[in-house]
Image (tube, rainbow, N blue to C red):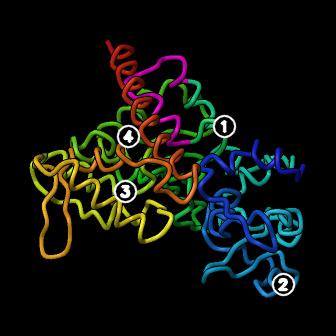
Amino acid sequence: MFSYSSICKSGLFDNKDIILFHPDYDKIILIDDINKFFFGINEMPITNCIQFFDFHKITINYKEKHYLVLSKLKEYFEGIGDLDKYEYQYIPINYYNFIGKELIGIHKNIYDFNKKFIEYLTINKPLYFDIFINMIGREYFNGKLIEYSPLVKNMSIMYDGIVINYLDDNIYINADNICVSLINDYNKQFKNVYNMIKMKHLMKDIDTFVIYNLTKITKSKDFSKLLVESHNMKDSFCISIELINNIINFKNELYKEDYIEKFIKIYKEKSIWSKNDSTIYLNFEGFNKYFLNLESNYLESQEMKEIIMNFYYNITNELINSYKSLYYSK
């Protein structure tokens, strides 16, 4: 169950960038990412103390952050233990599915509702249905607990910025007047749920919609916002070259400076960059060409080049998916 291949199948590594390699402990992963995926929160469940996990080298501090040693995942789960009596403090859907424990109570209701909603989206294929499925989690639960109240049996769960309140046997989409029963036949109500989420959140304005989708590629909402703003003002030099260099692993400073100099020479006659004091700024075209001209010999590793190529592969892939969605909406 705790082999690397089994952990991969859990969906934990859907974003492979979350894995780091430690010189002494091999694969490590941020403890916040572990807790968010398996328990629906960033914090460590309170069933045991942090010092217990640190003492047994299950978790370690590395580069001023707290990590789980991946080979100690079994010991971490054993230390966490059973969460049944903490029903409203965590969302152990992925955790229980991974260890083979049956879901009960409100967690089962949430899981069943999400599963049926995904089936509805898959069969009917409404506009941008794939975005909704990825938001909820196609193969695994993708929400985060942001508020709970066991007294009124309420859990507020965020899915990519969209909050759904699960209150006893009903759900509410944010503060909107839409209620769906979790114990009755809710299949007939899925169209209302879909329309509410689409109109109130995903489609409230064009920039929100584009930023939402672009963030799935860039993994950074701030970076996506900057790209959209630069696209809206294509001739404006609003992207600092240093901001881009922060996400590119050059071999060293000399290679970085050499590439910047080369880039400026290539596009000396093009109005895609501007220098203000000692900082170079790019417009939307300049941003794209700065990435596309990068060669492997400037980079720390071939893996960095693969990341850049995957970035543009994902953009192309999403473009094709968007056209498919438009086709299904006809």
Nearest to N terminus: mark 1 or mark 2:
2
44 drawn magenta: no
Q: Estimate how packed mark 2 is, as few (under 14), some (14 to 19) or many (20 or more) residues with alpha carbons within 10 Å.
A: few
Q: Determine contact: label 3, label 4, CB under 8 Å.
A: no
Q: Residues within 10 Å of mark 1 (few under 14, many from 20)?
A: few
Bounds of the magenta segment: 120-136
Q: Secondary structure at mark 2?
A: helix
Q: Amino acid at mark 4?
A: Ile
Instruction: Tell me the kind of residue under disc 3.
Output: Lys
Gap between marks 3 and 1, in whole Å? 24 Å
Asked whether, in this view, residue 168 is left or right of residue 101, the answer is left
Three-letter code, disc 2:
Phe
Please tell me the numbered disc located at residue 52. Answer: 2
Residue 221, numbered label? 3
Q: Position of residue 177 (x, y in %)?
A: 35, 45
Tag 3 and tag 2, C-beta contact below 8 Å: no
Left/right of residue 92 with respect to residue 171 in the rendered view: right
Q: Position of residue 157 (x, y in %)?
A: 52, 56
Q: Is residue 126 in the magenta section?
A: yes
Q: Earlier in the sequence, mark 4 or mark 2?
A: 2
In front: label 3 or label 2: 3
| Residue at the disc numbered 4 | 197
Disc 1 and disc 4: Cα gap in Å?
21 Å
Q: Earlier in the sequence, mark 3 or mark 1?
A: 1
Q: Which residue is mark 1?
A: 139
Write down the quadrant of residue 264 in the picture.
Answer: bottom left
